[in-house]
Amino acid sequence: MSHEKILVTSALPYANGPIHLGHLSGAYLPADIFVRYHRLKGSNIIYICGSDEHGVPITITADNEGIKPQDVIDRFHEANKNSFDKFGMSFDIYSRTSLPVHHNTAQTFFKSFHDQGLLVEKKSLQFFDEKAKMFLPDRYVEGTCPKCGFEEARSDECENCGALYDPSELVNPKSKISGESPILKETSHWYFPLGKFQERLEKFVDDSNSKFNWKENVLQYCRGWFKDGLKDRAVTRDLDWGVKVPLDDADGKVLYVWFEAVLGYISATKELFKNKENENGWKEYWQDKDTRYIAFIGKDNTVFHTIIFPAMLMAWNDGNDDKYLLPENVPANEFLNFEGKKFSKSRGWGIDVAEFLELFPTDPLRYTLASNLPENKDTDFYWKEFQAKNNSELADIFGNFVNRTFIFAHKHFEGKVPETGELGEIDKAMLESIKEYPSKIGGLIEKYKIRDAVFEMMNLARDGNKYFNDSEPWKSVKQDKLKCATTIKICLQTINTLAEVFSPVIPFSSEKIFKMLNSELCRWADSGTSILKPGHELNEAEILFTKIEDEAIEAQINKLGKVEEEQVYDVPEISFEEFSKVDLRTAVVEEAEKIKKSKKLLKLKVRTAGGTRQIIAGIAEHYIPEDLIGKKVIVVANLKPAKLMGEESQGMMLAVENSDGKLKVIEPDKSVNPGTKVR
RNA sequence: GGCGAGGUAGCUCAGUCGGUUAGAGCAGUGGAAUCAUAAUCCACGUGUCGGGGGUUCGAAUCCCUCCCUCGCUACCA
């Protein structure tokens, strides 16, 4: 029996969009399986998660929709919490970083670092919008580039010519918030000196790895960061939305999201214990040397959990008596792609959890994802594979085994667990097998080899079918009823074990089976040996997994790549006058060549009104230059020239993206002459 | 172009601190059985382990080089 104390966290999802299947595969499903397994094992385990609710992207969503950031996070927090619920995530708490307990926690950390004299203050000039009374993040300021005259340059960098300059050099700056000209105002920010911790961090990673066997991909990532050398990181930002910097004269400053979001794990744990008898119970998980802390994440979060968060905890421990423990392992997963490509909401590629679970039940999804987790490299979700996993594994192998056994029990043994006869070799072997599976599967889960564990679970069902076939109870029921009874008894025993070992992966179905068996979950260690007693009453069997028809899958495949209409039309109107300023002309491509050192750019010579001109187009990945020569195209002829990779572009060629993400040049009818105005 | 990851059976993926005939599941082919959700069970794989070169008695596994894919990043007027 295990009394291990374990703290598990999954990366806090950002409350600025829905959860999709990729998220589940990365940080949530593996953790949930791990946690559910440990609960059965008897470990003292808590599982923490919540919404990450600060940062600039949320304010931008709010601005775009004309609502408040609070409305944005309320919406997505609720939506994501519901999705997780439906998906069967067994968090002990799903908290949120907008709660006071989180603000306090984050501020306390900042204060401690500040009091220790650890944080470095650096001053710089930044734009300030006097009307909106706020400092403007880079993306909220626009002006004319002092080098190339580009009118939509950012505050310290021109996207057009690539020039870097001091914000004070920007010509005619405009605030995107109020439209006013912002003034330059001195502001200061605090920086966390990560470099100071590098040596200890390297040791931490090395030690943890040798003790707990970190995943190779995670180690590689860390080594890369160490090799480049860790640099100071700003921990504050000039922004209205977030955790206020707890210092005097720090108005309008908040803690940078990366700094406070990871502390959300701690504050969420405090929240969990808030209303319990032992309000300080959270400390027993975070500050007891005997606790094992495991942080499940997707690979994009690696640096925060292997380097930054540990550094912050070290810094806290340096200056305080209550010492936090560091993660013993950070089993980061790679990414799940969708039908061969990256999830992309704007291209209508992929499906979010809520939508999926409207269409299909939860367990087949959990099973499919779990059996193909991106543990070593990126993997793909395919609709057809989902269907195959559901139909031929869950329904045919597993479901049908349960069904055929139950039908026998009800038809020939009055719905009761029958008395066993003498055990043959085959029976003993099966009983032995039942005993071995739980420990084998448990061992794999503890090594974070969830995919292999799931495979072994299904193997038990395969063994069950083989045993059933080899025993031929349909024959023995006529000749030797006691032998038949033995077979069915052992099959029921197998089903009991199946329900047990499968329960971390497909909890809803597992529960159904226990209802059918009139039995319940036991300690993992007992699962292969706990015996259903003869005479034990069984309940009626029900179908566990229904097959998914081809049509249902086809329908989903057909939907791929079709972008929702509302997204297409969510664009501001322009007047006819504005439109008519654009001079669209037909043109013919006379020359085309790749620009060296550039992946995307082609240099084109096109003939149109006013002669031949050079256009730089970002279509190198979509067209071979020769194929473009002679093509009739449409260009924006009066666009202000710009320089790209040192080449002047005198216009822009129109192209559209198809559902595969390929750019297609728009071609006018062949009869049209070059230089004609488009009307 | 820079950084990172990867290229193994028709498909999805294991394996890789060098070592006997390179694996699994699915799909496919043939057979058995008929209790069951037309489910199950058995048998069947000549795969340039991306290409080429090297190290070695021996390489999918180590080194070099090239090609391709994916992600981040810069150039997408």
Image: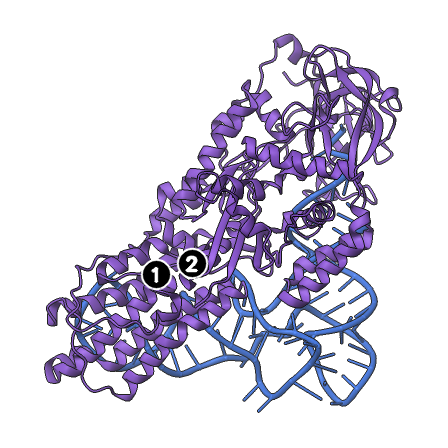
| Kind of residue sitting beneath label 2 | Arg
On screen, residue A290 above or below A678? below
Find residue A295 and report its horizontal and vertical position in percent: 58, 52
How busy is the neighbourhood of tag 2: few (under 14 within 10 Å), some, or many (20 plus)? some
Q: Secondary structure at mark 1?
A: helix
In the rendering, what colour is chain A?
Answer: purple
The residue at which mark 1 appears reads as A394
* Disc 2 to disc 1, C-alpha distance: 24 Å
Left/right placement of residue A496 relative to residue A292 reads left
Q: Position of residue A427 (x, y in %)?
A: 28, 83
Whether marks 2 and 1 lie on the same chain: yes
Which of A405 and B60 lies nearest the eye of the viewer? A405
Q: Give the side of residue A174 with respect to residue A515, left or right.
A: right
Q: Quadrant of residue A135?
A: top right
In-front residue for pair A315/A510: A315
Chain in blue (letter): B
Q: Amino acid at mark 1?
A: Leu
Foreground: A653 or A144?
A144
The dot on residue A39 is 2
Q: Residue at the spot x=81%, y=28% of the render?
A: A158
Query: Would you say residue A677 is visible in this rendering?
Result: yes
The answer to whether residue B28 is left or right of residue A443 is: left
Quarter of the figure with the N terminus of chain A? bottom left
Residue plotted at (75% across, 26% down):
A138
- Residue A82: image quadrant is top left
Up/down of B76 relative to A675, above or below: below
Disc 1: host chain: A
Q: Is residue A98 visible?
A: no
Q: Which element carries disc 2, helix, strand or loop?
A: helix
Q: Residues within 10 Å of mark 1 (few under 14, many from 20)?
A: many
Decide: is A26 above or below A192.
Answer: below
